[in-house]
Amino acid sequence: DADVTQTPRNRITKTGKRIMLECSQTKGHDRMYWYRQDPGLGLRLIYYSFDVKDINKGEISDGYSVSRQAQAKFSLSLESAIPNQTALYFCATSGFSGGPNTGELFFGEGSRLTVL
Amino acid sequence: RKEVEQDPGPFNVPEGATVAFNCTYSNSASQSFFWYRQDCRKEPKLLMSVYSSGNEDGRFTAQLNRASQYISLLIRDSKLSDSATYLCVVKKRNDYKLSFGAGTTVTVRA
């Protein structure tokens, strides 16, 4: 089983619908992240959380919200989906002594979202 | 200007060939540098860090040129399994955030 699990893996929805992407991890890491990936663009950080009570906006947080339900769970919500939120979404984790200092993020397998 | 820029490729090379490509970064405060590998429709995975003096990991060699603000990745004796997109990643000093390039695609053919 993957250490970082995302659900759903694929989702097609309509404009205006609420969507939640869920992420759970068994790595015991405190730090969790949500990124989106679009063709021709690098991974862009949406939100990140360094522990359950610490949630921060990334570079493209507008239109998104997150919830850190537990150390192992970090969900991303699109309150009212729009077509330009069609993308591949990745959840990632890092440990306190690693992560950005060592450059190592552990990614889930991705959630492909299509908004019609 | 993008913070991290890469030639998207694709670089199409025969098995056994050497392929090299660069990545430029715009912020001179960048401190740490990494290469990630991403297979088609898969998640990115850390390939290697890039050290100031340059470093090797098997057939992979990474170099850093701070004066010109670029890093490079060289793959020797290419294997079919090296076909992937290689993401350049940069981190600024005292910053949690990693900045990702859009990737360079390498295709190794038999």
Image (cartoon, coloured by chain):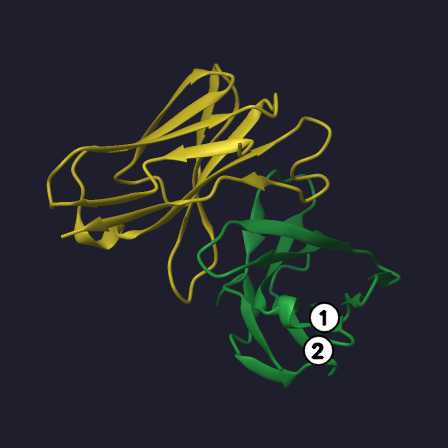
Chain colours: A yellow, B green
Q: Earlier in the sequence, mark 2 or mark 1?
A: 2
Question: Mark 1 is on which residue type?
Answer: Ser
Mark 2 touching mark 1, by CB under 8 A?
A: yes
On residue B102, which mark appears?
none
User: Foreground residue, A7 or B51?
Assistant: A7
Callout 2: few (<14), some (14-19), or many (20+) C-alpha neighbours within 10 Å?
A: some
Residue A94 x/y as whole percent:
61, 32
| Secondary-structure class at tag 1 | strand
Residue A22 x/y as whole percent:
36, 29
On residue B72, which mark appears?
1
Residue A15 sits above or below residue B61 on the image: above
Residue B77 x/y as whole percent:
77, 77
| Secondary-structure class at tag 2 | strand
Residue B34 sits above or below residue A71 on the image: below
- CA–CA distance between discs 2 and 1? 7 Å
Is label 2 or label 1 in front? 2
Question: Mark 2 is on which residue type?
Answer: Ala
User: Foreground residue, B80 or B55?
Assistant: B80
User: Foreground residue, B48 or A84?
Assistant: B48
Residue position marked by numbered label 2 in the rendering = B20
User: Foreground residue, B28 or B41?
Assistant: B41
- Marker count (numbered): 2
Which image quadrant is residue B35 in? bottom right
Which image quadrant is residue B15 in? bottom right
Give the residue drawn at x 53%, y 59%: B39
Residue B34 x/y as whole percent:
69, 55
* In this picture, residue B49 sits left or right of residue A26: right
Residue farthest along the front direction in this orientation: B110
* In this picture, residue B62 sits left or right of residue B98: right
In the rendered image, the quadrant that contains the C terminus of chain B is bottom right
